[in-house]
Image (tube, rainbow, N blue to C red):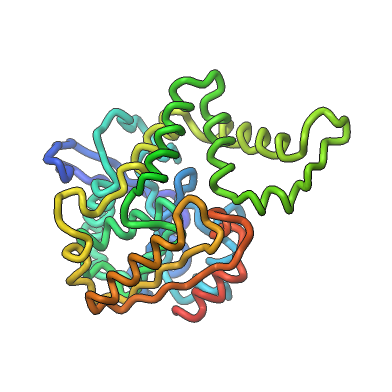
Amino acid sequence: MEEDLQYIPIEDFETLNGLKVQKINLSYQVFGKKLGTAPVILVNHALTGNSLVTGKNGWWSEIIGKEKSIDISKYSILCFNIPGNGFNEDNFDYNLDLNLGDIALLFIKALEKMKLPKLHAVIGGSIGGCLIWEMIALKNDLASLIIPVAADWKSNDWLIANTFLQDRILKNSKDPVSDARIHAMTFYRSPKSFNTRFNRTKSLDKKMYNVESWLSHHGVKLRQRFSLESYIFMNRLLSSTDITRDGQTFENKISKINSSIHVISIDSDIFFLPEEDQETVSIARKNNLDIKNHIINSIHGHDAFLIETKQISDIFTKIF
């Protein structure tokens, strides 16, 4: 079955900094139409996500599927696992000095090896959206449609501060994965989301606030399926987001893109700020790019890209 996890070896890989890596095995899944028989949509997963994008346990199955806004009866859906995300990996070297641009280069090389010169669309949320910016900075004609969701082309000081604290928690806590996840959930959501959902209520035995119980549950849940090495590595990749790391300006990097770009922002996102997206869109328009900014209205903050499936589906339906 196409949905089964498949592997593609990228041999003699050279990073953007010139580091030579003998081989990296990229794993991926394909959903919908067989590759080569329909337009291809690449979906980049989020930090603790993976290639299981649709189906019974798919993290975006309300958006991608039969007769969904991204219809798998019309498209081939391709999703790579970011190396280091811990999803059925064999002997990955977590000490490799890779940045998010290197992951983008790996994905591009895999697409070339799979003889997929131009995609119909690339979609990604959070770090998956950051990865889209990294990919189009390296390959301007990557896809007809470019759709980063709740993401940015650079790690700003706020993002660096949060990933710095995440790294400290992961390296110093007695229960690192759980504690880092609890911290992360406080900026993946918003104050209003927490206050509306929990309203200072307590558990039945009155020993814990329900918000504490909920955060603890998410911490334990991630610890059960995500390794400490993966979390540290993926967090480092997120903090490395920067398409201008080689000294070229943002304007320079995007000047030759002729794709339609659809930046999707969340009005309550306190992780990737909507005003930063507005500035990006403004700069891109001044450079004659075909770019639009779609806004998801939600109280739920950054995680609204996983929660507000109706709004996202409506936006995708308009785009496609």
Please tell me whether residue 171 is drawn above or below residue 1 in the rendered image: above
236 left or right of 17?
Answer: right
Q: Residue 120, position in %: x, y?
A: 34, 73
In terms of depth relative to the viewer, which is nearer, 62 or 203?
Answer: 203
313 left or right of 118?
Answer: right
Please tell me whether residue 155 is drawn above or below residue 291 in the rendered image: above
Residue drawn at (76%, 46%), measured in percent from left and top?
198
Quadrant location of the C terminus in the rendered image: bottom left
Residue 34 seen: no
Residue drawn at (32%, 56%), measured in percent from left and top?
153
Q: Residue 32, position in %: x, y?
A: 47, 67
Q: Which picture quadrant has residue 55?
A: bottom right
In terms of depth relative to the viewer, which is nearer, 262 or 48?
Answer: 262
Q: Residue 264, position in %: x, y?
A: 45, 67
Residue drawn at (70%, 39%), measured in percent from left and top?
214
Q: Residue 317, position in %: x, y?
A: 51, 78
Q: Residue lying at the far left in this picture: please name it.
A: 18
Across the whole image, how many numbered discs are drawn on residues?
A: 0
Q: Which picture quadrant has residue 248?
A: bottom left
Residue drawn at (41%, 64%), measured in percent from left and top?
123
Residue 46 seen: yes
In terms of depth relative to the viewer, which is nearer, 29 or 103?
Answer: 103
In terms of depth relative to the viewer, which is nearer, 207 or 101?
Answer: 207
